[in-house]
Image (cartoon, helix red, strand yellow):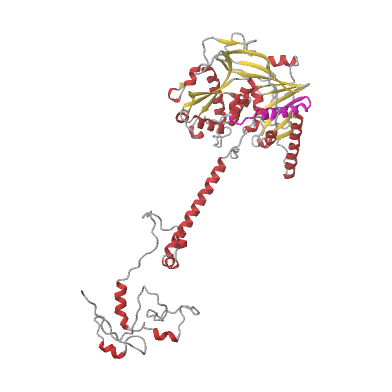
Amino acid sequence: MVGFEVGSVPFNPDGWGPPDSAAATLSLPNQPSNVPFAPFSRSEKIGRIADWTRNFSNQGRPGSKHGAHHQSDSAFDFSGDDSFASLAADDDSSFRLVDTSAKSHHHNPNRPKFNPRWRFNSYNNARSQLPQRRDEEVEAKKRDAEKERARRDRMYNNRSQMPQRRESSVFKSSVDIQPEWNMLDQIPFSTFSKLSFSVPEPEDLLICGGLEFYDRAYDRITPKNCRPLERFKNRNFFKVTTTDDPVIRRLANEDKATVFATDSILSTLMCASRSVYSWDIVVQRVGNKLFFDKRDGSQLDLLAVHETSQEPLPDLKDDINSIHSLSVEAAYINQNFSQQVLIRDGNKVTFDESNPFASEGEEVAPVGYRYRRWKLDNEMYLVSRCEVQSVVDINNQRSFLTLNALNEFDSKYSGVDWRQKLETQRGAVLATELKNNANKLAKWTAQALLAGADMMKLGYVSRVHPRDHFNHVILAVVGYKPKDFATQINLNTSNMWGIVKSIVDLCMKLDEGKYVLVKDPTKPQVRIYDVPQDAFDNDYVEEPLPEDEQAQPPAEDVDGELANAITNDVEAKEIIEEVA
C-alpha cells in the first residue's frame, strides 16, 4: 500500500508564515522564495485578515468607505511586490467568467435580448450591460410611440366611419326658396325620435287596378345564372299626386277622412330622420281638410342612391355616377324590374275598379291601388293611396307583394362586389346597403307596411360594366316579411306614426292656405314655409335665384339656438301628451 510522507513542518511562534531560520532550509520546487505565507484562494471568504489583492492606486470617492485608506492596512499591502506578477498572469490566463444565472427551458436564439427581466438583474450584470440596455430601452420607446400613433389612427378612422352626415359634400335645396315665402317654423330631427303614437288596424275603402302573378323562377337566380334586365317602354307608369287623384277627390267630397296623402309622401315623413338629401312636400289646408301633395317633377318620384353613404359621389351633373344620374337610373331599374319578374301570360287579378289614371286602350303597368283609412283620433281620419305591384298564391291563399330593386353601379364606392359576395355572404351585402341606403330601404319598408303587403321582394341589379349605365343584369331576388324586416332595420312603427301625427297636428293649427315642408339640405331639420296660392302651379313662374339671394332662415346666436331648442322640446312634450 502506497504511503504518504508528510515531511517536517516548521513552527513560527513569533508571527505568520515560516520562521526565518526555516526559509533557507525549505526547498519547494517551482515556488518563489521570501514570500509571506498566504493561505488564500478565490473561492474562500476570509474577510479582511489578509487581503493581497488591494490596490491603493485606485482610490474611491472622498468619504467612501470602500476607498478609505488607513495606516493599519499597510502591513497587509503586498500589491507592490513583484513576486505576484507571474502568478497573477498565470491565474488570469486560465480564468473564465461562468454564467450561473438560471437558463430558460425554451431557449430561442432569435428572441430579442431586451425583456422585462432586465429590471430584476443584479447590479453587476446591469452595470456590465448598461449600454446595450439603454439602446434597447430607446428602441422600445420608439416602438411604443409607433404603437400609440397607430392606435390613435385606428380610433380616428373608426370615428370617421361612424354613421354621420357628409360634411364635405354641399347639397342643394330641392326647391328654390323665394323671397316672398315666410318661414313659420323649423323642426329638428332630434325631436322626432321622442315621438310615439299607436294606430288601430286600417280599413280598405276601395281597391283599384289589376295585378299580375309573380314569377317564382326569379327566386332561384344567382350571380352565376343571372338574367339581363329587360326594358318595358310600352307600359306606362303613373306618379299622380294626392289632389290630382280622382278617387281621393271623391272620398274627400264624401267626408271619408280629414287628412289625405299617398304612401310615398307618408313614407317620406315617417323616415324623415334618416334622410340626408333635401326634399319638399306641399301642404294644402282647405276648410277642415288637409292634403299632402308633391310637386310635378319632385325628388319623391326618383330613388336616391348612396344617400347615407360616407363616400361622396361626384358633383359633376354629367357624370354617370352623380347624384341626379344615379337617381334617374335607379328609378328606371326599379320600374323595369317590377315588370320583368311578373308572369305576362294575360292572367290578371282584377279589383272593384280599373286603374283610375289609365285611358281607354292604354297599356299600363299592373298595379293595385289600395285606398286605406287610419283613425288618428276621435274626430280625425287619414286616407292614403297605397300601391302593391304583384300577387302570389301561397297555400291557396292570395298574398300581395311589393317589388323593388337595389342597384350596384360601382363596387369601389360600396366596397362589396355583389357578383362575388351575393351567393356566399348575402348578409354582408345587405348590411352594406343598409349603411349606404338606409333611408331608401326604410321608405320601401314603410310603404309595404302601409299597403298591407304580405311580402316585399328586393332585387339586386348590377351594371354589366361599371361604365355602362344602360345595360343591367339581375343577380338575385330575396323576399322579406315587412314586419320582420322593419324590426331588422330598427324601424319603429309607433315612432313613424308619431311623426305623422305631430306634423298633422302642427299643420291643422295653421290657417287655410298653401304651405311647403322643406328638408334643409345641410342640417337635420325641416322648415315650414307659407307660400302663395299659385305657387307650383303651371302659370306660376318660379325663377331660380342665386344662393346668396335666396331667403335664408334668421341668424341665431347661442342664446337663440338654446331658446329654440327649449321651445322645440316643449312642443314635442305637448305633442306627446296630446297623443297620449
The magenta region covers 488-517
Total numbered labels placed on residues in the image? 0
Instruction: Give how far across and how far down residue 119 sits, in percent.
Output: 47, 62
Q: Quadrant of the N terminus?
A: bottom left
In the image, taking residue 135 as reference, residue 558 lies left or right, namely: right
Residue in view at x 46 percent, y 60 percent: 137
Q: Is residue 228 visible?
A: no
Instruction: Give how far across and how far down residue 488 sits, in percent.
Output: 58, 30
Residue in view at x 74 percent, y 36 percent: 568
Instruction: Give how far across and how far down residue 46 sits, in percent.
Output: 40, 77
Rendering quarter of residue 35: bottom left
Rendering quarter of residue 261: top right
Residue 148 to residue 237: above or below:
below
Q: Is residue 506 inside the magenta stretch? A: yes
Rendering quarter of residue 3: bottom left
Q: Is residue 576 inside the magenta stretch? A: no
In the image, taking residue 205 as reference, residue 312 lies left or right, namely: left
Judging depth in this view, the residue of 506 and 400 nearest the camera is 400
Q: Residue furthest bottom?
A: 21
Instruction: Give how far across and how far down residue 373 sits, in percent.
Output: 70, 19
Q: Is residue 401 visible?
A: yes
